[in-house]
Image (cartoon, helix red, strand yellow):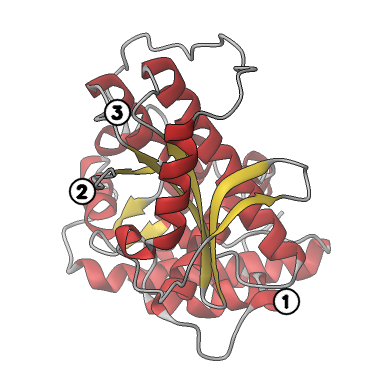
Amino acid sequence: MPLPEELQGSSWTRQTARNMLPLLVWCAKNGVPITYGQLDIELQRRQLGHHVNVVVYGHPAGAIGDALLATEQEIGERIPPLNSLVINAKTGIPGSGCDYYLKHYLAETVLDKPTAEQRKAMALDTMEEVWRYQGWDELLERYGMRPIQGNIPSLTRAPRKNNAPSKGGWSNEPESEEHRLLKEWVALNPKILKSKIPFREGKQELLYASADKVDVMFEHDEGCIAVEVKSIRSNNQDLERGIYQCVKYQALLRAELKARGQIPNGTSVLVTENELPQNLIELADLFGIRVIVAVRTRA
């Protein structure tokens, strides 16, 4: 099939968009975003362009977004905006030029004037959709393009140490007094979250639609935070389970917000009274789970 009109032509914007698209498909298939600076470096490394002021990459990124919208109309299938993977290094999300494509894709949940936190949630949710989409190879083939050869060095992580998840099962023991007290203290102290959202007292043991229960949930019209609590009694295996629980609770929270037609500004946090060992710090970082070490006065 011929290229969409939005990618045709000899202008710098159109040529760069054609060179960028296979790189962004690699990012989509590998579950990573790419900053404007990394994009500039990679295009030069592959001899596909010369150094430019990175802000101008918004133009070819927009051309890619327009091309996908045209293809979407042609085939009658929703395609998440691949250009949303081009992000600002400081904010971790695409620039404001991508807002049009975010709003098009998330039409049912878009607000006229989202807050900065809500806009970030919209961008992250869209990026997740890009990573989940299975049709990128078919899209390249449709456009007469080939996948890139090799990797993108600046985005390729060094091999991780073998840190296979522990699967020792769940404890059947009743809730400890230490856990109950920490849970109550967290619910009464939303300030420990250091959130810009003005949360009030949290709700304990809130039930998800999946029948899972989260220790503490902080809710607000601008967003929600699910908190998994691990007391002084938790060993490293229990802390590891807590990290994986946060991954689950965050996904469930975002799913429920989407089901309600709200912007999925939902995150999870692990609050623990114990410092995490280095391997668990790395694990939490890998999944993007924030860890807060609670310091409270005991009676």
Q: Residue at x 42, y 61 (%)?
A: 188
How far apart, in angstroms, are the residues tagged by discs 1 and 2? 37 Å
Foreground pick, 226 / 20: 226
Relative horizontal placement of residue 129, taking residue 47 as reference (left or right): right
Q: Position of residue 155 (x, y in %)?
A: 31, 37
Q: Nearer the viewer, mark 2 or mark 3?
A: 3
**Secondary structure under badge 1?**
helix
Q: Position of residue 152 (x, y in %)?
A: 32, 35
Relative horizontal placement of residue 22, taking residue 49 as reference (left or right): right
**Mark sitting earlier along the chain (2/3):** 2
Q: Amino acid at mark 1?
A: Glu
Q: Amino acid at mark 2?
A: Ile
**Secondary structure under badge 3?**
helix
**Secondary structure under badge 2?**
helix
Q: Is residue 140 visible to us here? A: no
Q: Residue at x 39, y 66 (%)?
A: 94
Q: Which residue is mark 2?
A: 41
Relative horizontal placement of residue 287, taking residue 216 as reference (left or right): left
Is residue 153 shown above or below 220?
A: above
Which numbered circle lies on residue 282? Answer: 3
State which quarter of the image contains the C terminus. Answer: top left
User: Residue pushed farthest front?
Assistant: 299
Q: Amino acid at mark 3?
A: Glu
Which numbered circle lies on residue 108? Answer: 1
